[in-house]
Image (cartoon, rainbow, N blue to C red):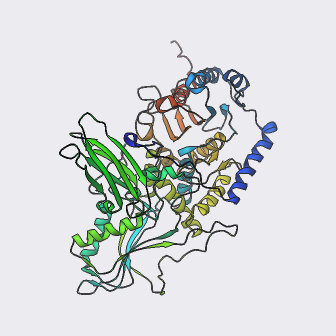
Amino acid sequence: MEYNRALLEIRVHRNKTREWISRRRQRSMVAGILLVTAILPSAMPCARQKSSWAKASAASAEPRARGGADVARFRARARAALAEVQAQKTYWGVVVADQDTGAILYELNADHFFTPASNAKIFTTALALASLPPTFRFRTTLESEGVIGADGRLAGDLRFVGRGDPDLSNRKFPYAGKVEHDGPVERVLGEMVEEAVAKGLKEVDGDLVADDSYFPYDPYPAGWSVGDLFFTFGAPVSAIAFNDNSISIDVLPGASAGEPAVITVEPRTAIAGLGHEITTGASDAKPDFAVVRRPGTDFLLLRGLIPIGHASVKLDLAMLEPAEMAARTLEQLLVERGVRVLGTIRVHHAPPPDTSEAGDLPPLPEMMPANGTPRIVLVEHLSPPLIESVRVTNKMSHNLHAELLLRTVAREKTAVGSSNAGLRVEQDFLRSAGIADGDVVLLDGSGLSGTDLVTPRAVVQLLRYAAQQPWGRDYISTFPIAGTDGTLEGRMKGTTAEGLIRAKTGALEHVRALSGYVTTLRGEHLVFSIFGNNSTKKGRDATVAMDAIGIAMVETLGAQPPPKQKK
């Protein structure tokens, strides 16, 4: 999800220490930078941004392969947008091209590196649609080595096996302009339990095992900041992704000042791992919350104050152990339906990925337990079609979903479901799309890593390539629409660009991005990429220049229709 730092001004001390990049990926990034640097003098006529906007605009490259009054008008408006006070200190990269011919209409720092933020999802979701069949569905099962006896007794463990489904929740499909929910957050798990009970299950003699070994155990991708891990956009990655691996907390004031607040948590079992010290304050106070991660049983500690008489406040935080949480929820649902569970709750993780020079661990057998006896599938749940998962990922800029797509591609294509394996598959895909080696340096699938690097030209090349594929129309349909839905719902609303720009947003601290597809008022189809790095602006001020450039594309580019002939 986009980088909204906290709901209701939650104050968190952010540890700014970044994870070290592996030596192999570090060398790859340096090599890519040296390659681009080496070819810049002879191979690209694009601008080099100077210390002042006047110098930058003077040095900006002339449009290639296309001229005309429309391009001149657009250039003037783009120059004016980037000359505004709120844009002057930002480092900008822009490419605008004809979608059909690839002719460059405008470029600025097109081959320089920028942090893409959630524009990294453009690559991940295209990779998923290119690599997985359109009929692909994520599969989640209840399995056992034993069978259900005539008396309803299951002799053995009951195993909940996840395979990366991003929608084990109450999310409604198909997506229709906004995310909607139906029923409790454990709805899918409840449906699976109901089916098991309908097949006669009354007692589990063994343990209840949450098995997320479809992916190597590696919950946090390289480059994610410690401070991100409190919040839903930094939720841990697991082959069992229950309720987006997040918990929702409703806080209500007590009956009088000084009393503890009333706390309600979803999933219900999450209350066991949440410490809270929230009191009821005076009626003229303001809600004030802070969250702390600490060692011990209550790893998440929520502290703060809510005024007496205040409406409930909802807070969303990342789940600590999603596989264990799913198992505890499953146990609760079984007991509520009269099923006895005699054993304990266990979690089965695969070993962590091997990130040494030798490569990843060999593939792990999916359906074979340690004793070699194949497991029997008692209940199977299938996700919505792949395109629906991609749509939610792009429309809502969902970080966890992007990471799951990357690892699923890796597992399906290489039998090793690690991020590194997925990124290697992605590099092959980018070559097939005509993107130069070294122009895309990603360490994750979502763009939450601040060490990701891409060039605007690489993004535009990928967008053009995707539009020409059999899955291209579906892919374009997953992008947010200006002024209409997703992360662009509130942007360019009421302007000529409303409904005519489909683009992926991106936001990290000091970073904004917008890349996608445009249909101009004159019917021309364009692809574009705009990056703004090193910006200190917040809120609308951080995106106003990008939106102005988007509106200018819609209004100016394309040939004027011929004048009507007089009869």
Please tell me which residue is depicted at 54% across the width and 15% down the height of the picture: 565
- Residue 412: percent from left, percent from top: 54, 66
Please name whichever residue, 19 or 14, is drawn nearer the observer in this view of the structure: 14
Q: Is residue 6 above or below residue 71?
A: below
Q: Is residue 526 above or below residue 314?
A: above
Q: Is residue 94 above or below residue 561?
A: below
Please tell me which residue is depicted at 32% across the width and 63% down the height of the picture: 272
- Residue 103: percent from left, percent from top: 67, 35
- Residue 522: percent from left, percent from top: 53, 26
Please tell me which residue is depicted at 66% across the width and 59% down the height of the picture: 22
Would residue 91 appear left or right of 175 to someone viewing this image?
right
In the figure, residue 170 lies in which quadrant? bottom left
Q: Is residue 157 above or below residue 557?
A: below
Would residue 5 appear left or right of 110 to someone viewing this image?
left
In the figure, residue 380 lies in which quadrant? bottom left
Please name whichever residue, 51 or 370, is drawn nearer the observer in this view of the structure: 51
Please name whichever residue, 199 or 48, is drawn nearer the observer in this view of the structure: 48
- Residue 243: percent from left, percent from top: 37, 58
Farthest residue toward the front?
258
Farthest residue toward the top?
566
Is residue 172 visible to the viewer in this orientation of the structure? no
Farthest residue toward the left?
255
Please tell me which residue is depicted at 70% across the width and 60% down the height of the picture: 24
Is residue 188 visible to the viewer in this orientation of the structure? yes
Count of labels in the image: 0
